[in-house]
Amino acid sequence: MTPILKTLSATLVAAALATGTLVAPADAGGSVSVTYVPANKKDAQALKAGLLFYQLYNSVQNGASIKQIGKNNVGGIGQYGFGNTGIIHQEGSGHSATLNQYGNGNSWGIFQFGQNTNANVNQYGNGGNGATFQFGW
């Protein structure tokens, strides 16, 4: 066997072994979560406006909104102050989310998609903004 053929054979065997060890079962669950907190006043105002538009589109009459599409989802919002905007939007099954806002003029949205994600957000102070996006499988 030539050196090139030996190297090629070893590479193919290594690749075959590696792919066999990297394959996960089809039913393996997991999730990915991204939280965005604006770095400046302009971005904070844009995020707050987006959350307010979401509430207008969904005919929300007060500062808290929980929308659940699916089954076995749990969500709760506590607001301890004035002028707060809180959103929990869940699509899929098995999601859990809580949002507590302590202070005034805070805005936060939790958006969960897929299945079996979990978020717990506590906001303290005044004028804070952010959003959490979660995708589970």
Image: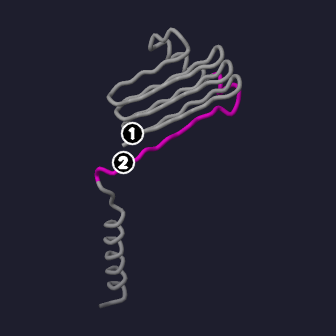
Q: Is residue 8 above or below residue 52?
A: below
Q: Which residue is disc 1 drawn over?
A: 116
Question: Alpha-carbon neighbours of circle 2 within 10 Å: few (<14), some, or many (≥20)?
Answer: few
Task: Indicate the quadrant containing the C terminus: top left, top right, bottom left or bottom right.
Answer: top left
- In the image, residue 128 lies in the stretch drawn in magenta: no
> What is the span of residues highlighted in magenta in the rendered image?
26-45
Q: Residue at x 51, y 29 (%)?
A: 98
Work out whether residue 124 or residue 20 is closer to the camera in this orientation and state it: 124
Q: Is residue 134 above or below residue 14?
A: above
Do tag 2 and tag 1 residues touch (Cβ < 8 Å)? Answer: yes
Residue 4 placement: quadrant: bottom left
The percent position of residue 102, horizontal first and vertical second, equals: 65, 24
Task: Please identify the residue farthest to the bottom as the structure is shown.
Answer: 1
- In the image, residue 30 lies in the stretch drawn in magenta: yes
Q: Which mark is residue 29?
A: 2
Residue type beneath disc 1: Asn
Residue type beneath disc 2: Gly
Marked residue nearer the N-terminal end (2 or 1): 2
Indicate left or right for 54 with 115 as reference: right
The percent position of residue 89, horizontal first and vertical second, equals: 44, 26
